[in-house]
Image: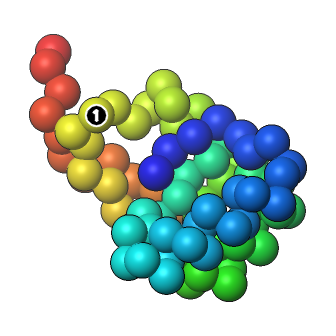
Amino acid sequence: MVFPTGRGSSLESYRILEMARCGTQPAGIISVRAGPVIAVGDMVAGVPMVGRLDAHPLEAIRMGDWLEMDADAGTVRVISGARQP
C-alpha cells in the first residue's frame, strides 16, 4: 500500500489491526511521511513500513510495478512492472 501521509487519527491504527485480524493487511506500507499513529498500528500488526524515501513514492511507483522492500534498511526498489514507455 502506498499513500502520502496519514491524518493522525486512531482509526488508522485500528484499521490496520482489523485488516491483520481478517488476514487482509497489505504486504507492506510505503508512505511519504508516516505519523506515529499509523506507525504504531503497523508495528503491532506486523506490517513492514517504509517512509521518508529519497524519491516521492507516488511519483516513482506505478500500478503494476513489483517492489522489493526492506523495512529494516528503509529501502524500496522497483524490480519490474507493467509500465509503458
Where is mark 1, residue-wise? 63
Bin the neighbour count of mark 1 within 10 Å (Cα to Cα): few under 14, some 14-19, many 20 and up.
few
Which residue is painted at 49% across and 69% down in the image? 19
Left or right for 30, reference 62: right
In which quadrant of the rendered view does residue 32 lie? top right
- Identify the amino acid type marked 1: Met
Q: Is residue 27 above or below residue 43?
A: above
Which residue is painted at 14% across and 34% down in the image? 82
Across and down, in percent, residue 79 comes to 25, 52
Left or right for 55, reference 41: left
Which residue is painted at 44% across and 32% down in the image? 60
**SS at badge 1:** loop
Across and down, in percent, residue 43 comes to 68, 80
Which residue is painted at 83% across and 52% down in the image? 9
In which quadrant of the rendered view does residue 62 lie? top left
Q: Nearer the viewer, residue 11 or 73?
A: 11
Residue 69 in view here: no
